[in-house]
Image: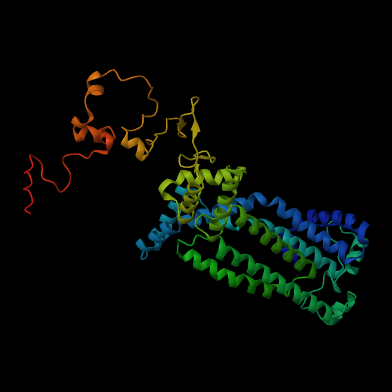
Amino acid sequence: MDTIASLFSFITTPVSWVIVQFHSVYGAIFGPDTGWAWGLSIVSLVILIRICLIPLFVKQIKSTRAMQTLQPEMKKIQERYKNDKQRQSEEMMKLYKETGTNPLSSCLPILAQSPFFFALYHVLNSIATGDTIGVINQSLLQSAQKAHIVGAPLAAKFTDSASKVEALGASLTDVRVVTAIMIVLMSASQFFTQRQLMTKNVDTTVKTPFMQQQKMLMYVFPVMFAVFGINFPVGVLVYWLTTNVWTMGQQMYVIHNNPTPGSKAQASYLDRLTKHIAQHNKVGKRRDRAIVKAIVAKGRDRNEFERKFINGLSKAGLAAQPDGTVIKSDSAATAQAEDGTPMSAGGTPKRQQPKRQSKSQRQHGGAKAAGETDEPKTSLTKSEEPEDTKPAAAAKKGGAKPAGGTRSKAQSGQRKGPQRPKSPSKK
């Protein structure tokens, strides 16, 4: 422990100072010697650290998604150079350099908070042994030793002896029950967080060894927490349980609002987005516009869920634009020109179908075309020509039958040309 103290002495004092500041606030509300004051001080320390680590968390998400995208290429390299490990490593490093990814970026939040974790562990261990540390003086030390969380002292461990626990003013049964419950909750939260990631926010179209590794970690991490948790003081268990709950909630937010492309979470998100856009005829949030813009930019490279999203907008009469907005498509709505002529969404006149004529109009020469005036025809030849002398083709072209209901001479089933007179019937 002295080795750990020497390695993390540069951060022990700041951590103890932060805890003392929060304790002064909560102590005024709940009492300075209560477990609530010291426990909430540790919880507040975790929240403060995790807020500071949000930029690293965002970088972790981007790195993890980049690694998922590279999995097919990495698999090809492994198969191509499976007998040459050195060349395989060189090609892997070359691929990381070309794409700007770093495999260690996904571990940044854990690595960044490790110093705070060990500093807190050393602070609580010093409280258990009765040693002052950092800005925690003798009076604060005595106050912390009196603090109990549901009957368990802040500095007690699951593996402590009965005499040591009694010296802290508690019973061994209370300490072991409380620590066991906290270890189970800590392991369960870790398992749920990893399972949520694997079942909802992983690209299901890519089957790679990386997926198997993540699945294995889903079971390994909870076991590790359970094994190491029996050696953690109650205060450290509070710290680690709080950070697990924070990670779980933070991940749920990311999965709900910015899911991995190709995952089940993306399918759910795009379904909600389609309904929202169809209801309001616009993309409201800037984050949603960025996602729509990215989907439009993919073109033919869209996955199944993204193609379904574009088709859903089309069925609603909307079309996604390259800037992430949506407009009404040609099939949904049309504008009108100043003279009332229907116009398409692009501004061109919309083609109109001719009006259907009634039977009486067809029998009396057809109705006037749309836009035709009532002025008399100037062609005297056509107007003075008897209607029964007009060819059948001209009658069909004008869309009218001969007047008076007379039928054409060339009827179906009747021979053309001069007809043979019928012989008189014999009586």
User: Quarter of the image holding residue 80?
Assistant: bottom left
Q: Residue at x 48, y 47 (%)?
A: 314
- When the figure is inspected, residue 14 is found, relative to residue 245, above or below; the finding is above
Determine whether, in the image, residue 58 is placed left or right of residue 6.
left
Instruction: Give coordinates of residue 109: x percent, y percent.
Output: 64, 56
Determine whether, in the image, residue 376 is placed left or right of residue 249.
left
- When the figure is inspected, residue 345 is found, relative to residue 15, above or below; the finding is above
Determine whether, in the image, residue 86 is placed left or right of residue 108.
left
Query: Would residue 149 be seen by someone viewing this image from the given angle?
Result: yes
Instruction: Give coordinates of residue 421: x percent, y percent.
Output: 7, 44
User: Quarter of the image holding residue 187?
Assistant: bottom right
Q: Residue furthest front?
A: 427
**What kind of colouring is applied to the model shown?**
rainbow
Q: Residue at x 36, y 19 (%)?
A: 375
Determine whether, in the image, residue 123 is placed left or right of residue 418.
right
Instruction: Give coordinates of residue 241: x percent, y percent.
Output: 73, 66
